[in-house]
């Protein structure tokens, strides 16, 4: 069983190298390689999850060198549950991105650049969850950050490069701090093996332990976007391609949260920074959700809720009890899935209408009922509506806070309840303005054919006059920018009409150039892409799979809650992890 542990790290790296060698050729083969690789990683993750739950922590040492001399990969309950959920998310997002690229006729560049970077980032995330030493954790961070930077700036548009610059500066500063923390740790203890550090930190002077803990915690707080180190996130994530944004929202900050859990549970149990973490959790929850309530763009609203709900996870860690850590793990699993699905839906909304600004949206419930349902379910889950998994995770944290009974813990409970109510307010306002209200006449897509509904030949034009995405012809899908008149978009003499030369940012259907165009939106490569009334089925299917996965946590609430309690007990006991890595005699 231990021989399977390196697979989630090594296999995506090999696939990325193969895809870089192939370039943009053999598109079907490359698509199969990407999806097949991530499917195998998911299967291996499930096997490791079951084995770790039954047998305890599993360990493999690279090159046969035992810890602390070699690189140890450790698959305990926490690592495997994070690995499994992240593998499911990366697989679904990959399917979504391939469908989007195919529909937008952008297959070549994503296959040659986007997919290898995606696989490298996936390997980095897996390595971060499995690694057993601090320096390899640094290497994992660099892998996932290098891949994520390519995904963030892919296409080279001005907004993406600007966001990428901010992201790169934050990443470089945190990496520098991480190296300093590793150097201080090694200087004080003579090792970077986390199992050995758990033993060697105890006899150190309190001032040295505090210095190392604060330095490492600062690094992970930046990665997790915990207040006051969260300002970079809302401006960085929304500019990336929809699949990249969804993956960032679901996984990158959770790697930071995972590192905080591992740090506080294994290396500094009951350390002096618990009170500081409580204040940080409270500020992260409240300030993030206040920012979300003030947004008029769906992607920015989701970015602020992402920051806000990181506070719930830190809340559970700061309590440092079995109930608190179990609640943090449960909420992390829930949030990875729900937040990713919401960002994928936001990407489909932008593809459908050309915008995610609620000021320019309206009536999506009638125009795009399936997309509306796929937004509504995870949005209510995020807000914590009973009996969904968001409610169950928050309930576990509230119970742990009340059981703690300290004034600060009770303050956190109150802050968590306020945050949940304000989250409900934010998503309800978004639903009302974007989905429920009657669309203003200038809303993109107003007056288009309802999703999945066929119109008459007079509305569509000749049969088969659809674009590559299945978009309708100008009269049926032009909306306020319809095809009537020579000066309007899609008209004989207007932009996008048949008399206009094909531009580099245009995608033309075989029946009518510019068909289905409501307004332009950016594709994966940053080109202007036509909006489309109909979504490619794999995009819908991948998003629906994540929504269903989020709902499955409610159906499996009993076993999942019991598993998180076992996970928390194993983490706080520490001895199972140390003995598995260093030997049963330790």
Image (cartoon, rainbow, N blue to C red):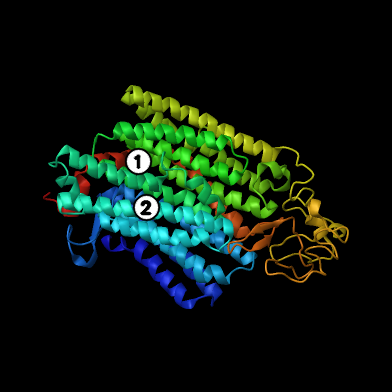
Answer left or right for 83 relative to 134. Answer: right
Instruction: Classify residue 42 by image quadrant.
Output: bottom left
| N-term-proximal mark, 2 vs 1 | 2
Q: Position of residue 381 (x, y in %)?
A: 52, 38
Secondary structure at numbered mark 2? helix
How would you rate the neighbour count of disc 2 (Cα within 10 Å): few for under 14, some for 14-19, many for 20 or more? few
Q: Position of residue 215 (x, y in %)?
A: 28, 45
3 lies above or below 356: below
Instruction: Classify residue 429 by image quadrant.
Output: top right
Answer left or right for 272 relative to 234. Answer: left
Secondary structure at numbered mark 1? helix
Q: Is residue 51 visible?
A: no
Residue at point 57%, 35% (across, down): 293
Q: CA distance from mark 2 to mark 1?
A: 33 Å
Residue at point 64%, 64% (across, down): 103
Camera-nearest residue between 514 and 66:
514
Residue at point 63%, 44% (across, down): 373
Q: Is residue 71 visible?
A: yes
Mark 1 — residue?
Answer: 564
Camera-nearest residue between 6 and 237:
237
Please identify the quadrant where the N terminus is shown. bottom left
Mark 2 — residue?
Answer: 173
Answer left or right for 433 relative to 156. Answer: right
Instruction: Mark 2 and mark 1 in contact? Answer it, CB < 8 Å.
Output: no
Q: Nearer the viewer, mark 2 or mark 1?
A: 2
């Amino acid at each position: 069983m231990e021989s399977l542990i390196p697979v989630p790290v090594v296999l995506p790296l090999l696939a990325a190298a193969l895809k870089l060698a192939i370039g943009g050729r053999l598109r079907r083969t490359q698509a199969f390689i990407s999806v097949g690789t991530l499917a195998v990683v998911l299967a291996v993750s499930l096997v490791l999850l079951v084995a770790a739950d039954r047998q305890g922590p599993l360990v493999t040492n690279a090159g046969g060198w035992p810890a602390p001399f070699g690189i140890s990969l450790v698959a305990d309950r926490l690592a495997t549950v994070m690995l499994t959920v992240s593998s499911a998310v990366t697989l679904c997002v990959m399917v979504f991105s391939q469908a989007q690229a195919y529909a937008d006729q952008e297959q070549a560049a994503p296959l040659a650049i986007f997919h290898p970077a995606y696989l490298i980032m996936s390997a980095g995330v897996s390595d971060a969850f499995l690694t057993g030493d601090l320096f390899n954790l640094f290497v994992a961070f660099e892998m996932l950050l290098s891949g994520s930077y390519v995904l963030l700036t892919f296409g080279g548009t001005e907004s993406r490069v600007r966001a990428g610059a901010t992201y790169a500066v934050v990443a470089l500063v945190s990496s520098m701090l991480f190296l300093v923390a590793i150097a201080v740790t090694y200087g004080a203890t003579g090792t970077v093996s986390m199992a050995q550090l758990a033993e060697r930190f105890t006899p150190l002077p309190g001032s040295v332990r505090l210095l190392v803990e604060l330095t490492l915690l600062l690094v992970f707080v930046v990665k997790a976007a915990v207040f006051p180190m969260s300002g970079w996130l809302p401006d960085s994530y929304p500019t990336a391609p929809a699949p990249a944004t969804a993956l960032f929202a679901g996984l990158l900050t959770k790697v930071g949260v995972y590192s905080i859990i591992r740090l506080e549970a294994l290396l500094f149990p009951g350390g002096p920074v618990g009170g500081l973490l409580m204040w940080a959790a409270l500020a992260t929850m409240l300030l993030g959700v206040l920012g979300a309530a003030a947004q008029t763009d769906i992607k920015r609203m989701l970015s602020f809720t992402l920051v806000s709900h990181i506070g719930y996870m830190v809340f559970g860690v700061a309590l440092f009890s079995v109930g608190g850590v179990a609640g943090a793990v449960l909420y992390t699993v829930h949030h990875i899935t729900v937040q990713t699905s919401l960002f994928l839906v936001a990407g489909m909304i932008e593809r459908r209408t050309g915008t995610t600004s609620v000021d320019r949206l309206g009536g999506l419930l009638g125009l795009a009922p399936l997309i509306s349902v796929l937004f509504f379910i995870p949005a209510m889950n995020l807000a914590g509506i009973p009996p969904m998994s968001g409610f169950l995770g928050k309930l576990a944290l509230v119970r742990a806070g009340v059981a703690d009974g300290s004034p600060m813990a009770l303050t956190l409970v109150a802050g968590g309840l306020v945050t949940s109510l304000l989250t409900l307010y934010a998503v309800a306002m978004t639903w009302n303005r974007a989905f429920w209200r009657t669309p203003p006449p200038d809303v993109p897509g107003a007056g288009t054919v309802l999703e999945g509904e066929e119109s008459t030949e007079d509305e569509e034009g000749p049969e088969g006059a659809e674009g590559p995405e299945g978009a309708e012809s100008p009269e049926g899908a032009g909306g306020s920018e319809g095809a009537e008149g020579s000066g309007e978009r899609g008209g004989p003499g207007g932009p996008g009409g048949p008399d206009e030369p094909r531009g580099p940012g245009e995608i033309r259907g075989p029946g009518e150039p510019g068909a289905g165009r409501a307004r332009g939106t950016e594709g994966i490569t940053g080109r202007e892409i036509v909006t489309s009334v109909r979504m490619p089925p794999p995009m819908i299917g991948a998003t629906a799979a994540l929504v269903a996965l989020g709902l499955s946590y409610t159906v499996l609430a009993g076993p999942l809650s019991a598993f998180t309690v076992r996970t928390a007990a194993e983490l706080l006991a520490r001895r199972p992890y140390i003995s598995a890595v260093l030997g049963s005699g330790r």
